[in-house]
Amino acid sequence: MRNTYGAETEIGFGIAPDLDLRIGQSGAYGNLDIGRRLGTIASEQSEDMVRSGRAELGGVTQLGSLYQLSKEQAAVPSVGLLGRVRALYGPDGTAYETDAVALFGKSLVGGERPLGISLNAGLISRIDPGPSDRPHRYLANASIGQAISRDTALVASYAREQQERGDQDFSLAQIGVRHRLRSQKAIVGVAVGIGLNRDTPQYQVAVAVQWQIGAP
């Protein structure tokens, strides 16, 4: 099997001013991107099976919270802090890790067709890492979005994440479009990404739907 198929869902709801609780579940099946999606919990034996073409199946359950430290003001960007605990499970057992991510956002152009940028940077820490596991890994991503109409925006992004066991960093450039469906209180997004090194999938296609439940 040459591809990886994945699905992810997350629900978030406010529990206090500027504080959201996030609960998520994801799964993946395949062999190209399975190590990164599952936090590389596979053993060397199962990695050999993946290289031979056998697909793997696993998932991630996560619980976290997002706190908005400050809102955008003049030249100062908005700042948020995301913290999560994750359980990663696959054919060789279960592993646990935490991550902490700082989120920055800034509007560069206002008006009817705004232009904005965002930058996220964080640290992933493995709980009780194995002999070949990195105890800490970094992640970073940056994006820029340009509205082309009242409800539609073009988005370009770059994601980088340190991997384990000597692999090159996950490095993916992506471009997509997001459209707001006002009647359904939903946002639909489609994106296509290209891997920039041999340890990143050659290409990635993603579809996302976001609903606002209970929004006015």
Image: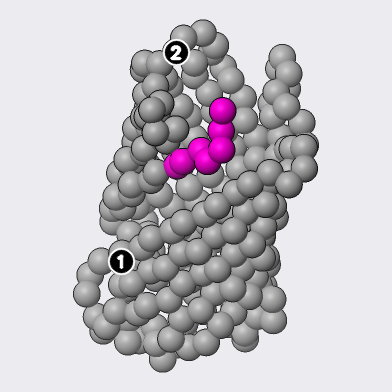
Relative to 191, residue 113 above or below: above
Name the image quarter holding the N terminus. bottom left
Q: Is residue 165 left or right of residue 17?
A: left
Residue 198 screen position, x and y as percent: 34, 61
Q: Main secondary structure of the magenta part?
A: loop
User: In the rendered view, how is the structure colored?
Assistant: one colour
User: Which sits in the foreground, 92 or 20?
Assistant: 20
Relative to 177, residue 132 above or below: below
Query: Between marks 1 and 2, how big is the CA–CA gap?
Result: 36 Å
Q: Is residue 159 left or right of residue 48?
A: right
Answer with mark 1 or mark 2, whichever residue precedes in sequence: 1
User: Which sits in the foreground, 118 or 173?
Assistant: 118
Q: In the image, what residue occupies the spot 44% across and 13% down?
A: 113
Give the amino acid at mark 2.
Arg
Q: In the image, what residue occupies the spot 71% across and 35% down?
A: 79
- Magenta residues (range): 210-216
Asked if residue 102 can be seen in this view, the reply is no
Q: In the image, what residue occupies the spot 35% across and 86% down?
A: 48
Residue 40 screen position, x and y as percent: 49, 74
| Picture disc at residue 4 | 1
| Picture disc at residue 113 | 2
Q: In what element is the residue under mark 1?
A: strand
Q: In what element is the residue under mark 2?
A: loop
Toward the left, the furthest residue is 1
Q: Are marks 1 and 2 in contact (CB under 8 Å)?
A: no
Residue 134 screen position, x and y as percent: 62, 73
